[in-house]
Amino acid sequence: MNRFEFARATSVAEALNLVAAKPGSAWKAGGIDLLDHLKERLIEPARLVDLKSIPVLDTVETEPDGSLRIGPLVTLARLASHPAIRGAHAGLAQACAEAASPQIRNVATIGGNVLQRPRCWYYRLASYRCLKKGGETCFAIAGENRYHTIFADGACHAPHPSNAAMGLVALGASFVFQSPRGTRTVPADQVFTIPGKDPRLENAKAPDEILTAVQVPAGSGVRSVYASVKEKAAFDWPLVSNAVALRRDAGIIRHARIVLGAVAPVPLRSAAAEQALIGRRLDEATIDAAANAAAAGAQPLSENGYKVELLKTLLRRTLQSLA
């Protein structure tokens, strides 16, 4: 890796000033994905601004309306075991608990996890100049693509890597970003972007913005669950995953959010599967209809057609666990 300056900020305002003073700077939270990028020379920041000494970014607070305000420096391990999250937002706790290994979960932050870059080997290897590195080719299309997307509106087929992001989208969370221009709040399902005109972008965060909080609305009778299928039981990336949040009144589904993972460049909400559930009882016919709707329109690559049936099977099992 190249030489860079290291600065430790003690407030959000100081962090913003440090980055504004030296263009090309980067933020450091837990540093898990950042260190990989530095070693692989995927980024070469002029200055690294450490956020770990900003106390306000490392809290979990319950607001008067029952919603949660989660600081971006809170670790995945802490979220996975937090009583308020395990109780009202089980799906988010499960998603955090399944990430990586215990050692990584004790260091990795929720902010870094949801904003991490794709794990596609063509992106990570220096010898391939793919779309995400300013090239003109997605090498996965004609290459080794067994772990890549089966839904891709853009040219890049790297799947979104964050478990926690799926749980947050399913719960209707919002992200709060702060920059020298002010503060803005963005719904989680609008933060992550399909690779379009610029395939190098995966989310709506500007380079000079800090993620200062994740806001999770009160449960209000919503039950949530996260589930995945992996080649290994632990310390592995999902082949497919899903996060589901449902609210029922007198047995009838009144609210549904279904988010599909490891199959698209974003945590993919399946509007078709949600509509197959709303207004119905959670019986086997409804579950089958939702699973089939979730997989409709899939366009697998040469080596990952197995994901279509795996996706349907996993969603069936996830919904059955909520029945």
Image (cartoon, rainbow, N blue to C red):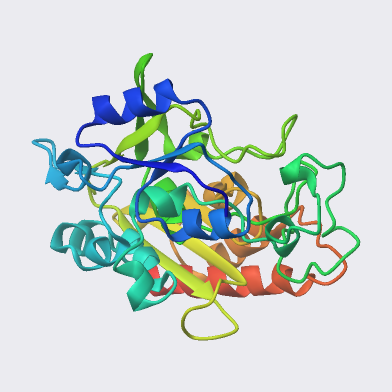
| Residue closer to the observer: 91 or 8 | 8
Check the image and report above or below for 292 versus 38.
below
Residue at the image position 51 percent from the left and 72 percent from the top:
228
**Count of numbered tags:** 0
Residue at the image position 28 percent from the left and 59 percent from the top:
75
**Quadrant showing the N terminus:** bottom right
Check the image and report above or below for 232 versus 93.
below
| Residue closer to the observer: 198 or 86 | 198
* Left or right of 207 in this view: 133: right
What percent of the width, then of the height, locates residue 203? 55, 37
Whether residue 57 is visible here, answered yes or no, is: yes
| Residue closer to the observer: 254 or 146 | 146
What percent of the width, then of the height, locates residue 177? 36, 29
Residue at the image position 40 percent from the left and 72 percent from the top:
98
Q: Quadrant of residue 295?
A: bottom right
Whether residue 279 is visible here, answered yes or no, is: no
Q: Quadrant of residue 178?
A: top left
What percent of the width, then of the height, locates residue 12? 25, 30
| Residue closer to the observer: 222 or 165 | 165
What percent of the width, then of the height, locates residue 168? 39, 49
Residue at the image position 60 percent from the left and 68 percent from the top:
240
